[in-house]
Image (spheres, rainbow, N blue to C red):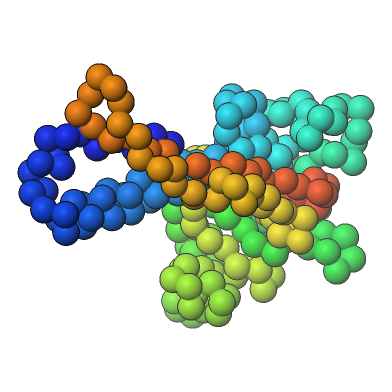
Amino acid sequence: MPVSVDGGTLIRADSPEAVVNFLSFYFENAQTELAEILGTGVWSNVVSNNKMVDGLVGAVDDGTTAATYGGLSRSANVFWKSNVTNVAGALTLTGMQTMFGSCTEGARHPTIIATTQSQWNAYWGLSVGGQAFPVQPSGHDEQLAQNGFTNLVFNQVPIVVDSHVPTGNMFFINEDYVYLYVNPRADFNMRDFREPVNQDAMTSLILWAGNVCLSNCARQGKLTGLT
């Protein structure tokens, strides 16, 4: 990710201390922007942008979106397909339970459920409506809560909101088979500033290189077409 600072801005900063403060603030914003790009990448579809990480929309799939994943054809390797149900309707507890069961084998089951704010709200409503004496839904994952993530639970598994999840989707993910690989040479590393020969400016780069990988697609699933 390129980061450039023009000479006029540095002149307005007016002192070495101000320049240092400005650059620190500038790079904090750049790192936040890069983190947002990575967040988008984690939920990309593997197909549209080959410079993006192999995101979960394509990784957790039955071949409809990503016919191949990790170089393997899903039509030729059925074990490489995830569980996908196009609901084409409203979220239901029965539908969630069916998907949860499809992703479960023995003690291996989804460890986190990620969805949009709209579908999180729908689950909240189902939790309230299913009680004889409606009260605020209770239960949450303590570790996620301590780190600032509001969550509910389903089968003792936390449900969280991620703004990057595509509209109308709910993902059932087993994190035991999800890996984030990062190249240590490009883990938010910043290159030295360079000055172009034809500009009064300084340019640098913040580098990140890595990928998200699944080792067991069959233990993952998603509900699509939720309204």
Please state the horizontal and vertical placement of residue 97, each as a whole percent of the image.
72, 59
Which quarter of the image is occupied by the N terminus?
top left
Q: Residue at x 65, y 43 (%)?
A: 211
Q: Please say if 104 is above or below 192.
A: below
Q: Which residue is drawn at 66% across and 52% down?
A: 180
Q: Nearer the viewer, residue 61 or 46?
A: 46
- Quadrant in the picture for residue 33: top left
- Quadrant in the picture for residue 159: bottom right
Q: Residue at x 62, y 51 (%)?
A: 184
Residue 82 visible in the snapshot: yes
Q: Which of 121 and 165 is in front in this view?
A: 165
Residue 57 visible in the snapshot: no
Please state the horizontal and vertical placement of residue 40, each as a whole percent of the image.
50, 41
Please state the horizontal and vertical placement of residue 81, each as a whole percent of the image.
82, 38
Q: Which of 143 and 108 is in front in this view?
A: 143
Q: Which residue is drawn at 28% across and 55% down?
A: 24
